[in-house]
Image (tube, helix red, strand yellow):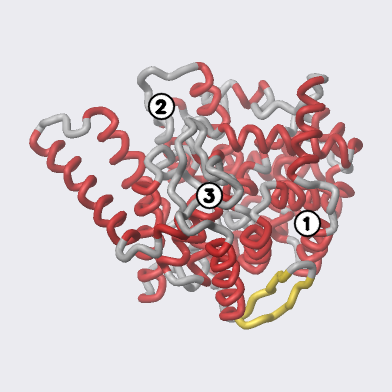
Amino acid sequence: MPNFFERASAGLSSLLNDATIRARAAKSTGAALGRAGGDLGERLIEALKTAARVRRDGALETSELCDLQVGVNCYADSPGFMRTQLWESLLDRAERERGDDGRARSGADAGRSEEGETLDDMCAILAADGYYETLQEAFEAKSEREREAENSGSTGDGRDGKEWRENVGASIERDLKRTFPHHEFFVASTAKGDAGRAALANILKAYAMHDSKVGYCQGMAFVAGLLLIYLPENRAFAAFVTLMEGSDFRSMYVHSMEGLKVRLRQLGAVVRAKNPTLAHHLEAHDVTPVLYASGWFMSAFASDFPVRFSGRVMDCLLAQRSPSLIMRICLAILNEAAGDLLKLGDFEAIVVYLRTEPRAWSYERLNAVMESALSMHDLTDENVERMDKGAVATEDVVQCTPSPALAKGPSTEDPLIDASDVAESPRSPAHARSPSAVDDDKILDVIAMLDDWTTIEYDAENE
């Protein structure tokens, strides 16, 4: 199965190459599953075995058939080209909603960044010949300048240039092989897969030049990759920028990850309001949204769920461009899982469940989740913000940071981590790090550790 959080911290991800660490992780996972017990424990074990079998057998997803979500209707087993036509139509509509000067008719504040700087409207800019290609060329030129500067011993663009090269160029190349590794469009060692990876790299590099304040962050590859499965390369780029700006994905990928923190806090408030029994149970066991929902938000479910499911999510995102849509799906997943979660009285077992069971749900169960989410008409962007503000005002909020047992960060006492092997997160340079940056590192380290822990190639030897 695709593994998003394995990429969240380079230092921790590399630990999976150590057989000893893998063995310890498998043992810890086995212990948690043992405490779950009964039928539920067996289901969790089967979920891990299924994930391992998919990786081992190399079963491929394809785009020949899809479940197409058009408004409130889902058209199951539709030809893949129909999704292409739908997304093209939605992009055309987005262009028509813009003025002739490329600005949104709603006013000059549309697409405004956190610094108040108006971003270019991608749908309008793409009408200019060669803009997308120019961005790619600019990326390669910048990379070449930095390489030449490093080889000559000069500073080039200085410390920022070195960080840009390491955090953007190297991160993109590293993440390509981890993005949809079991989809025919990106699978390794095939002509189609090689072409798909090259196109995905082009999109991510172009966006890094288009929006240098974001550059590249883990999670973006899955969103762009999903779009690329069904759209031509330049149109996939246009759709990606539309999502980043129109659906406010951008705020989740900036260095401070402020948008992600807000969404995780909002999810806690929404669950408290809509399912207080489950919210109390999760909080009583120190299970906060950062431990299970970060990848859901940052990859629009593409990193953890089948393309058939995440494709439907994208149908709705391009049509509605509403940040609350993913919130509704998160709540629907938790509601669907509530019956099982309330039976679990152990932190590790709950986290293992949330990181393994939903991704292995049957087609029928995932369809029920989507139908439930789409029926939550009262969970609008405005109502989500209102719930969040109310919770913050009364200090009745779920903290985005993990529980104290995990938030202390990597240590030699942790059975999954050797302190000597932990490297700096690629998004958090060592110099001039603020307290909030340190907190960000802790969040990344914990979610990376948990995903490594729950996506071990579980087999009979680990039972």
The residue identified by callout 2 is 420
**Residue at mark 3 to residue at mark 1: CA–CA distance:** 37 Å
Give percent across and percent down for residue 331: 79, 47
Determine crowd level at label 3: few under 14, some 14-19, many 20+ residues with C-alpha closer than 10 A: some
The residue identified by callout 3 is 244
The residue identified by callout 1 is 43
Give percent across and percent down for residue 140: 24, 52
Position of residue 396 in the picture relative to residue 227 (left or right): right
Vertical order, 399 against 447 (above or below): above
Q: Disc 2 residue type?
A: Ser
**Disc with the residue nearer the chain's start (3 vs 2):** 3
Q: Disc 1 residue type?
A: Arg
**Disc with the residue nearer the chain's start (3 vs 1):** 1
Q: Is mark 2 on a helix, strand or loop?
A: helix
- Which quadrant of the view contains residue 124? bottom left
- Residue shown at 16%/30% (left/top)? 155
